[in-house]
Image (cartoon, grey):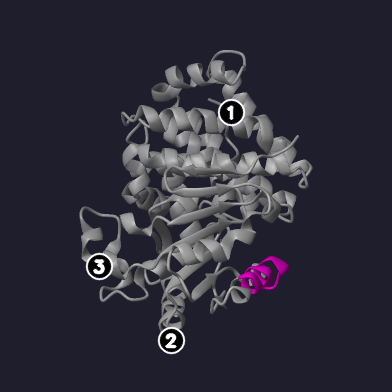
Amino acid sequence: MTMDAVNWNYPTAVRFGCGRVREIAEICRQLNVSSPLVVTDPGLALLPMTENILEICRSEGLSASVFSDIRPNPTGSDVNAGNRICRKHAHDGVVALGGGSALDAGKAIAAFAYQDCELWALEDIGDNWKRADQHRILPTIAIPTTAGTGSEVGRASVIVKQDEPRKVILFHPGMCPASVILDPELTVSLPASLTAATGMDALSHNLEAYCSPVFHPMAAGIAAEGIRIIQENLEQAVHNGTDLHARGRMLAASAMGATAFQRGLGAMHALAHPLGALYDAHHGTLNAVLMPYVLRANRDAIEPVIVKLSRYLALDEGFEPFFEWIVDLRLKIGIPNTLAELDIDESRMTEIGKMAVADPSAATNPIQFDARQYCEIGLAAVRGELSG
C-alpha cells in the first residue's frame, strides 16, 4: 500500500510521509533557524539517522550540534545541562529527535535556555506560564522516532524534579513545536518491545481523553478514531516492524492522542507519573500495565461511553468485550500483566496513592478517587487482581 506525503496544520504544522526528514534544513530556514541544537537520547545519538540530520543541516550552511545527555525519564539537571550548551554555542532553535524523553527535554531546553525564570516556575498550575517571556522561547522542530507520547504536538514537558522526587508538568503555549516531521522510516528500527510499550502509551492517551468527563467533542472524536487506528495497526507494527503503513498510522495515532488529551487524562497517568518518578520505570509500559486495572475501577462512570466505543470498533457491544480486547491486545504484544513484573512492589503504594491524587491528571479522571482508592488500584496492579 502506498503512503502519500501530506501536510497537516493541526494542531501545528506537520509533514507526514516517508523520507520527509530530508526536509529538515528547509524547515530550519523557514523558521529563521541558522544554528539548531539537535536534542536526542544517548542511544539515538550514535545511530546514522542523527548523523544524517546533522549532515543535511551542515550541507545547507546550518551550524548544527548535538546534546544527548538525557535520561529515560528526563530530569531538571538534564534540561539545565542542555540550556548551558544552548547558550554556550548561541543556538537559535532546537531539533528534538527521539521518543518522549528527547522530545520533552528538547522542548524544555527551547523554552528555558534564554529565560530569566527557573525551570520549575512554569509548573502547570494556574497562570504560571505567564512568568516566561514568550519572545525568548526558541522554535522547536520535533521529529518523533516512536509512536507513543505524541509530545511533538504538545504544549508541555514532563520533567522529573529530583529533590522531591516527582514528575512535574511544565507548560507554556509557546512550547508547542513550530514544525513536526512524522517520518515512518525513522521508526522501523524500534524494537518490538518498545513498539508495543509506546503504542500502548498512545492508546492510553486516546482512551483516557475519550473517557474524560470534560465537554470537548472535537477531542472526543479524535480520540475515538485514534483508538480505531491503533486497533488496526499496533499488532502489525509490533510483529512486522518494517511495515511502513502500520508504522505511519501509529505515528498519526500517537499525535492524535496528544491532541485529544486537551480534554484531560486520568488515573492511568495519575499513577504512572509517581511510579515513574520513584522507580524510574518506562512511562508507556506503566500505562500499558495499569490500563485494565484503571478501566475496572472506572467502570461505573465510563460504561456508557465504552459501549459506544465498542460499537465503533466493531467489537461485540458492551464494556466486557472492550475490556477483553484490551487484555488480549496486551497479551499478543508482550505487555506484562502486573507491576510486580516491573520490579514494583507494594511497599510504597500508600505514598503513591497520595501522589496520584495530587497529580494534575487526576482532575479529569471520570471518578474522583481518593488516596486510598488509588493505593488499592496500585495494589491490584502489583498483585494481578483483574476480576471485577
Q: Position of residue 126 (x, y in %)?
A: 21, 53
Drawn side of residue 251 relative to residue 374, left or right: right
Q: Name the magenta segment's main secondary structure.
A: helix
**Front residue of this view, candidates 315 and 32:** 32
In magenta, the rendered stretch is 45-56
CA distance separating discs 2 and 3: 20 Å
Q: Which residue is denoted by mark 1 in the rendering?
A: 228
Residue 374 to residue 194: above or below = above
In magenta stretch: residue 274: no
Q: Which residue is denoted by mark 2 in the rendering?
A: 88
Which quadrant would residue 253 be assigned to in this image? top right
CA distance separating discs 2 and 1: 46 Å
Q: Characterize the local packing of mark 2: few (<14), some (14-19) or many (20 or more) Cα atoms within 10 angstroms.
A: few
Give SS at disc 3.
loop
CA distance separating discs 3 and 1: 40 Å
Give SS at disc 1.
helix
Q: Earlier in the sequence, mark 3 or mark 1?
A: 3
Q: Position of residue 3 (x, y in %)?
A: 69, 39
Q: Which mark identifies residue 388? A: none
